[in-house]
Image (cartoon, helix red, strand yellow):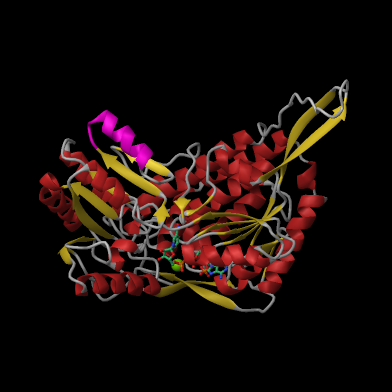
Amino acid sequence: MATALKFVAPENKAKTFIEGKHQILINGKWVEAASGKTFPSYDPATGEVIAQVAEGDREDINRAVSAARTAFESGPWSRLTVSERGRLIWKLADLLEANTEEFAEIESLDNGKPLKVARAADIPLAVDMFRYMAGWATKIEGSTIPISVPYTPGTRYLAYTLREPVGVVGQIIPWNFPLLMAAWKLGPALATGCTVVLKPAEQTPLTALRLGELMQEAGFPDGVVNIVPGYGETAGAALAAHPDVDKVAFTGSTEVGRLIVQAAAGNLKKVSLELGGKSPNVVFSDVDLDSAVAGSASAIFFNHGQCCCAGSRLFVEDKVFDKVVEGVAKKAEKIKLGSGMDSNTDMGPLVSEEQLNRVCGYLDSGLSEGAKAVTGGSRHGDKGYFVKPTVLVNTNDDMKVVREEIFGPVVTAIPFRTSEELVAKANNTEYGLAAGIWTHDIQKAHRLASQLRAGTVWINCYNIFDAALPFGGYKQSGWGREMGREVLEHYTEVKSVCTPA
Ligand code: NAP
Ligand code: MG
């Protein structure tokens, strides 16, 4: 592995973990893949292999689902009180928090994101998600319901609902926020009493595996959470199609989201999806332009643009268009690219060679169709998977760079004149995940917030997340919501009980 890297986590824990064995967690045991195969995980700053990971496929998924089923039906998990369940989740949060440095280093090295970002955002948000969900474990309630039943005059009934766990859940997560996506998925499953088979992304399996160790340390019973690293086409597809999985929760591309829905049709398992986006970020001329420029740059460049909610279409009122574009381009030029593990780095590499080629392909397509790069527009350097933060202008609505999710540090800036024109353009997308609005006109802000077809609208801010705030997409950006009390609905069934009383 890349021995020149400087690890600072106490006792060299990240280095020790990365250099150790990376197996599959099934029923509380770490095991090799049934096939004996492994696959590499890379440092995207150099392209070097940092770890070999057991490559789970259908057979491992079968074993993991069977362990999750037993833990759900008859294991100690099903006998825990809700208070005990909540305390275990809270303990996991404490352990994760205590190991923040280690997790930040593993995440930074495996994914490429700056260590300082992993430390300040990914890990604390994951900790907070577990704490928030620990609180819910004791508050998942049904209700008593007064009923009349017109065809049984004179009989009174006692009727109530129970909210019960949906069962065995398959969770398939992406590489852009590896640990955080695991926390978003595991938190509600554990709070509601489900059991889980989790498949991390092939590019970034490491923090999920380390989290599995912490779950054992916290005392989760065997089989409650099983973790099967492997490829989407094999392990992921087997999980989505498995007849004994009650629900599948997926975050990733809209294209694979469709495959998940098809695979789930076999046993009509419940499905929740958090998919792509092409989110509009709108700047009006009445706003403090400095903060709008800074916020708009961060809306697209945070996490190298590898955010499903990235503000990738920047709409600017025409009278301040040049000024805002110049401001965002200047911010882009100041961003220091480098290895995520370097403390001076503002932006790391994209996660993989495939993503590098994808994003560069979009740049080539946009530029050849007549778009102009005010800054950036190409790969950075010739080692690692770096792309220059890019601002494109002179685009039109038919270009792929305007219509499709690029998932890289590339924003298209588009002028508009009236709010009506803006709303039509902003909503002219198959996606509906998020939107940003920058204005000091309070009525305009709220009017627009209701007119934009998106699951999250940020006013005079962007990328503000909280475990209590639901997140998810309109249109082809997904089904259902992550976080907040809303997510609990996707992990529970409602049972109506009634008796003459
Ligand atoms: P992806 O293929 O959708 O990957 C997401 C997860 O789904 C990974 O765990 C993946 O496994 C798994 N998967 C892939 N094919 C599957 C299948 N047939 N059945 C079940 N699971 C499957 O995303 P990607 O290829 O990494 O990235 C491509 C594009 O997706 C990006 O450029 C971006 O536009 C979008 N994306 C969106 C998000 C988001 O947060 N909404 C996150 C990541 C990517 P493997 O890791 O083995 O492929
Ligand atoms: Mg990696």
Residue under the image location 21 percent in, 39 percent down: 291
Q: Position of residue 426 (x, y in %)?
A: 31, 50
Asked whether residue 282 is in view, the answer is no
Q: Position of residue 21 (x, y in %)?
A: 58, 68
Give the main secondary structure, helix, strand or loop, of the magenta stretch. helix
Q: Judge whether 88 appears above or below 169 on screen.
A: above
Residue under the image location 22 percent in, 45 percent down: 294
Residue under the image location 17 percent in, 65 percent down: 373
Q: Is residue 446 a member of the stretch shown in magenta? A: yes
302 or 494: which is nearer to us?
494
326 or 220: which is nearer to us?
326
From the viewer's perspective, is 228 left or right of 122? right
From the viewer's perspective, is 423 left or right of 499? left
23 or 74: which is nearer to us?
74
Q: Judge whether 426 appears above or below 352 on screen.
A: above
Q: Quadrant of the C terminus?
A: top right
Asked whether residue 168 is in view, the answer is yes
Q: Position of residue 345 (x, y in %)?
A: 28, 57
Q: Quadrant of the N terminus?
A: bottom left
Q: Position of residue 462 (x, y in %)?
A: 33, 43
Residue 386 location, quadrant: bottom left
Q: Is residue 225 a member of the stretch shown in magenta? A: no
**Count of numbered tags:** 0
Q: Which residues are magenta?
A: 439-451
